[in-house]
Structure formats: C-alpha cells, structure tokens
Image (spheres, grey):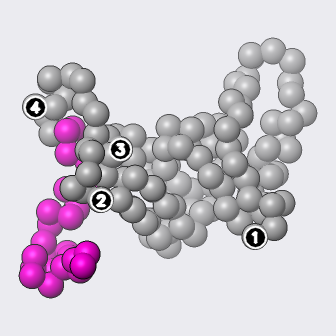
Amino acid sequence: MDSNRLYHFTEPIPHEGDGPEDPQTSSSHENILSSRVVVSTCSEAGILQDLDVPVGHFSHIVIDDAAQGEEPLVMIPIMTFSNANTNIILAGDPHQLGPMIKSPTAARSGLGKSYFERLMLMRDIYGPADTQVRKT
C-alpha cells in the first residue's frame, strides 16, 4: 500500500482555545479523509470526531485484540463512525486475556467480559459449538 494512503493517528489534536491555530490541524483532517486506512487506538478514535470525520466515512472498522478491550472502549469507534453500511470486524481470542478491570463495581456490572466475548457466547449467531472452526 502506498504510504501516502495510510494515516497512523498518534499525534494529539489541539482543541479550540489551546493556543495558536496549528496549520497541521486542517492538513490532518484532509490526510485522514483522503487515506484508505487510518490506524488508531479505540480511545484515540474519539478524537477523530473533533476533526469532523463524518459518520459512515469508513467502510470498515477493524478492532484488533477486541477480546481484551473493555466494551465502552471498543464502542468508541463503532458508535462514533459506523452506520448501516459500515463493516465492523472484531479480531481476537476470547480465551486469551480479557479486559483488565480494576474496579470491583465495574466487574460486578459485567465489564469484565468484552463485547467480543459476549458476541461469541451468542451461539445462534455463530452456530452450535460443534460447528465452530477449531484450531488443529
């Protein structure tokens, strides 16, 4: 892939009133909108909203290690940028390390289980356990 079509989002975006206007802010917006692939963490994806990236702009949203992400964190890019035409891809292994929840209240409320794991437990979506693809 042409590196000009890949945007790795790692720089903090200045907010209004943070200081002198940065000319890179508008170029970041243009770079993001013109890129085929934007790489970001789930929490950084929320910052893209400050750049007026429209809902439905991305044809695909891929969440890697989705089995480790707390559900509210994983929902940031999904709820912020997807529409009925967006493909959501959750990749991960629900049998590996799950979300790291330190709050007992949050754990009791179900946040110790990732969104990915909850979906995997809905057998009628993925079929009976004996038809699951298994590693050999």
Using the image, determine if residue 43 lies above or below residue 105: below
Please state the horizontal and vertical placement of residue 31, each as a whole percent of the image: 80, 52
Instruction: Name the residue carrying label 1.
Output: 1
| Horizontal and vertical percent position of residue 35 | 75, 61
Task: Write down the residue under mark 3.
Answer: 69
Name the amino acid type tagged 4: Arg
Q: Which residue is mark 2?
A: 93
User: Residue drawn 62% across and 62% down?
Assistant: 57
Q: Which callout, 4 or 3, points at the residue further toward the start of the chain?
A: 3
Q: Secondary structure at mark 1?
A: loop
Q: Which of disc 1 and disc 4 is earlier in sequence?
A: 1
Give the mark nearer the N terminus: 4 vs 2: 2
Horizontal and vertical percent for residue 45? 56, 44
Q: How many marks?
A: 4
The residue carrying mark 4 is: 108
Rendered position, 20 above or below 108? above
Verify CB contact (< 8 Å) between mark 1 and mark 3: no
**Coordinates of residue 1 in the picture (x, y in percent):** 75, 70
Query: Which residue is drawn at the image coordinates 21% and 38% (left, top)?
Result: 111
Compare residues 25 and 107 and report the one nearer the observer: 107
- Give residue 55's quadrant in the image: bottom right
- Cα–Cα span, label 4 and label 3: 17 Å
Tag 3: amino acid:
Gly
Q: CA distance from mark 4 to mark 1?
A: 44 Å
- Mark 2 lies on a secondary structure that is loop
- What secondary structure is marked by label 4? helix
- Of 134 and 27, which appears nearest the observer? 134
- Furthest residue to the right? 23
Position of 34 with respect to 39 (left or right) is right
Tag 2: residue type? Answer: Asp
- Residue 104 relative to residue 83: left or right: left
Q: Is 90 positioned to the left or the right of 16 in the image? A: left
